[in-house]
Amino acid sequence: MTAYANEIPATIYSEAHALGIAAGNGCSPTPMVVGTPTTPLGNDIDYSKDTYYVSDGVCGFAWVNIKPARAAFAAAALPAGALVEIVVQGTK
């Protein structure tokens, strides 16, 4: 591998990280109200019980599959703190 080839994963990671931060800073989340439904599987809120206003909107998560897990990009992203864990063929 050349020095240039070793720099590509770090470059991709830093560009993706910068774009992700910009997207997060540029979004306007829709606030939501969280409460107890009137029936066990209901889609409405019983306002006679406690309700909570969440100005930050819906919480969520994301993941990225990097295949193969031993790829140069995964090796570059792990020390940068971008990956929580690497799962190789079903094992952590």
Image: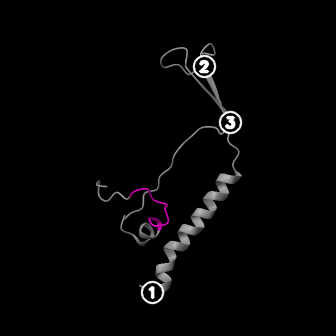
Circle 1: residue type: Thr
Q: Quadrant of residue 33?
A: top right
Residue 35 magenta: no
Q: Residue at x 50, y 66 (%)?
A: 80
Find disc 3 in the rendering and name its residue. 55
Amino acid carrying label 2: it is Asp
Task: Using a 10 Å C-alpha cutoff, classify the residue at mark 3 as few (fewer than 14 neighbours), some (14 to 19) or many (20 or more).
Answer: few
Quarter of the image for the C terminus: give it. bottom left
Residue name at image x 71 percent, y 45 percent: 28
Give, as a three-letter code, the residue at label 3: Ser
Vertical side of 55 occupied by 46: above or below: above
Q: Are marks 2 and 1 in contact (CB under 8 Å)?
A: no
Locate residue 62, reporting x and y percent. Answer: 50, 49
Residue 26 sits above or below residue 39 on the image: below
Q: Nearer the viewer, residue 85 or 20?
A: 85
Is residue 73 found left or right of 21 in the rendered image? left
| Region rendered in magenta | 77-85
Real-space CA distance between mark 3 and mark 1, rounded to the nearest whole angstrom: 49 Å
72 is higher (above) or lower (below) than 33 = below
For residue 2, the mark is 1
